[in-house]
Each structure stands twice: as structure tokens, then as C-alpha cells.
Image: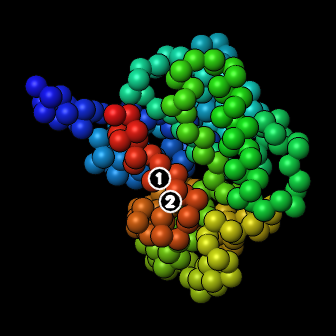
Amino acid sequence: MGEERGRREAWQLIRLHVLVEGQTEEAFVNRILAPALAGNTIIADACRITTGRRHGRVYRGGFVRYPHLAADLILRMKQDDRADSWFTTMVDLYRLPTDFPNHATLASGMPAAQRIAALEAAFADDIARRLAAPVSRRFIPYIQQHEFEALLFSAPAAFAAAFPDGADLRTLHAIRASVATPEDIDDGPDTAPSRRILRCCADYQKVVHGVLIAEHIGLDTMCRECPRFAAWLARLLALPAAAR
């Protein structure tokens, strides 16, 4: 009996709900992240942040106000409060809304990783305070260091898969070589990863090309090149063990 119960627990499925900023992140989670997690008994789904409702229509995507994210996340956590349900986010530090918890108290010159750690902690605390329920302990906040496109610099050669005749691979490789990790590419309005890509691939479209390039790169390479992303994915993959 005990052995049979142990086998059931070992194969217990985890439901992971990922609240994301835009269509690109949604496609990335559903097409790339979810299949990898499924191999570890985690069923993941992604949904864009609900930003408004009008005349029976729901508007999703974009992240301009923190209350949109908080309200949507809390609603989902209340709707699925089962012990095997977990929640996480995939939003960018780039242009993070100024009403985000703890945003105003952080110095602009603080290293990005340090800022993100403080913001994620404040985010978790705010959701726990608003929800005041055990399910809040099954929330893993994740803020990307800058934006999704930084992950694509994990392997600049992969841009050739989407732009066989039109990618400036030399410049893309030079950008990657100029930083310690792709996550360190800065978030200036003219130097953010997506802006740099557009100068090298004029026809770049986030959802179409971004996810295609990510598929060619693969999660293993992204994790090897991007430590914060790797740490988040490792934490997600460990959820079945944490739930037992």
C-alpha cells in the first residue's frame, strides 16, 4: 500500500499557470516551455494579463499598470486554489510600470539583478497581503532582466533560421560578445534587445520570428547563457518534488 501511494505521489501532476505580458511570451510558454515542463509532470499554460473588460469583451496583453496584473493574478489564484496548482509570471523589467510595488524606492543606478530581486520580493509580499490565503505560497514571481529578446542573443547564429538572407549576423554576434550574458544587454529606449535586433533584421516581428528563433536556440542553450532565466526554469522543474 505504501509503495503504491509513493508511486502515485511521484507522478502527481502539477498545474502551472503563467501570467505573461504579451503574445510573444504567451507563444514562448505554450510552444517551448510547456512541452519541456510536461516531461517533468507539469502541465503549464500561459495567458496574457487582462487589462480591461468592456461590453462583454475581454482585453488582454500589455503591462502598463500594476493593478491590472495584481487583480488578474489574484482572480486566477482564487479560481484555482487546489494544492497542486502553482502560479508564476513572465514580465519584463524594461518599462516596468512605476506603480509596481517597491518601484519608487529603488535607486535607478542599482544593478539590474539586485533591483529585480527586490521587486520580486515586494511583488510576492503584496500578493500575499491582498490574498491572505495559503495559495499565495504557491506563487513564484519572475521578472525578466530587461525583455524577451535578450534570450535570443543566447545563440545569434539562430537568427539565420528566420532570416536566411537578411540578418546582420556579424553585428548580432558583436552585441552578444560585448556583454557577460545576454541578460545584461541594457534596456535603453534605443539600445534594448528588440531595438538592436530591428537594426540587424529590419523585418523582425516579435511573435512570428522571436519564437521561431527561440525554438532553434533551445532551452538548454538559453539556460547556459542566461543565469536568471535558468534559475527560474530550475525552480519550475523542481515543483513536483516541492509538492510532495
Which amino acid does the dot numbered 1 rest on?
A: Leu
User: Could you say whether the residue bearing mark 1 is in a helix, strand or loop?
Assistant: helix
Measure the alpha-carbon separation of dots 2 and 1: 5 Å
58 over 201 or under it: above or below: above
- For residue 79, side relative to residue 74 (left or right): left
**Circle 2 sits on which residue?**
230
Residue drawn where x is 74% and y is 33% of the image? 66
| Discs 2, 1 touching: Cβ within 8 Å | yes
Residue at the image point whose x is 39% and y is 48% from the top = 237
Residue drawn 64% across and 48% down?
A: 143
Name the secondary structure under disc 2: helix
Give the camera-side residue of 133 and 93: 133
Q: Return the residue found at the far front.
A: 2
From where the camera sits, is residue 59 visible?
no
In the rendered structure, find residue 233 and report the number of the disc placed on it.
1
Q: Position of residue 7 (x, y in %)?
A: 17, 35
Q: Is residue 157 left or right of residue 70?
A: left
